[in-house]
Image (tube, grey):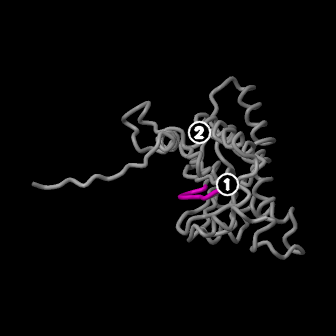
Amino acid sequence: MSRKKTIACNFTAEDSYALEGLHNHCIHVPSRQIWIHGTPLDLIDPSVAGVEPGVEYMMSTRLEKNLELLRWTSEREPVIIHLHTNGGMVEEGIAIYDMIKSMPFRVIMINHTHARSMSSVILQAADVRFMLPHSHFMFHGGSIGIEAEMRTAYSNIKFCQEFFDKFMLDVYTENATHGKKFRDKKVWTKAAIRAFLEKEMEKKADVFLTAKETVDWGFADEIMTSWDQIKAAKTAV
């Protein structure tokens, strides 16, 4: 007769709640980690299963709740955000950017795949920004689609030019001033960097950078190859 081995299970109710938060709400409270990714579209339409919806209001509101939850538990302990999304709605991306910037604790962000379009702006909100070795970065001027009465369309376009375009270029320019590529401040004034970025977007529309180029241009701080780097970032002053 075979004898079954009894294995002790130390899995607690708290562990169960933590796993539910991780898989259903994109947060693991005990380790203070948050995941940013789109809401699966197949929950709405099974025919688009696997399609990444990008930045939208469900992502934005979920992140706001998760950040507030961690702020309630501690305003001093750092938070790690895993970024795994593409571009999307500008307004919701700016809301995410502003919310991260407002947090009193240090925010460490890891880009897993592509920080591009609106998610490239979101990455800039973190205090410490990591690129995985084969992730990439893309910035551009965005796009707009309008079907409205002519005056409304003109008003929308004017607002996008004066607010959204300016906001995104301000963010890119400010972060690029710290990049190795623009180290010579006699040549690379803030105005010169801004003009260079505008010219790159005009020439290429979508400007793609490797992980190394992203760090060199000032849009990330390090390429992550070890969790020891995350530990160091959490304790850095």
**On the rendered structure, is 39 left or right of 100?**
left
Please identify the quarter of the rendering in which residue 123 is found: bottom right
Q: Residue drawn 81% across and 41% down? A: 162
- Circle 2 crowding by C-alpha within 10 Å: few under 14, some 14–19, many from 20: many
Type of residue at label 2? Met
Q: Is residue 16 above or below residue 110?
A: above
- In the image, what residue occupies the spot 56% across and 65% down? 132
Magenta residues, start to end: 109-115
Residue lying at the far top in this picture: please name it: 149
How many residues crowd around disc 1 within 10 Å: few (fewer than 14), some, or many (20 or more)?
many
Q: Find numbered disc 2 in the image and state the secondary structure of the residue it sits on.
A: helix
Amino acid at the residue labelled 1: Leu
Task: Farthest residue to the right: give it.
Answer: 186
- Quarter of the image with the C terminus is bottom right
Image marks 1 and 2: residues in contact by CB distance under 8 Å: no
Q: Which mark is residue 59?
A: 2
Classify the position of the N terminus by image quarter: bottom left
Within the image, what quadrant is residue 214 found in? bottom right
* Viewer-side residue, 225 vs 69: 69
Is 158 one of the magenta-colored residues?
A: no
The residue pinned by badge 1 equals: 123
Q: Is residue 178 left or right of residue 227?
A: right
Say above or below: 86 vs 232.
above
Residue occupying image coordinates x 78% and y 48%: 104
Sequence-wise, which precedes: disc 1 or disc 2?
2
Q: Nearer the viewer, residue 159 or 75?
A: 75
Residue 26, given in percent of the width and then of the height, sits at 54, 43
Counting the numbered discs, the total is 2
In this rendering, the answer to whether 98 lies above or below 188 is above
- Callout 1: SS: helix
Q: Position of residue 134 (x, y in %)?
A: 52, 67
Residue 96 position, x and y percent, is 69, 43
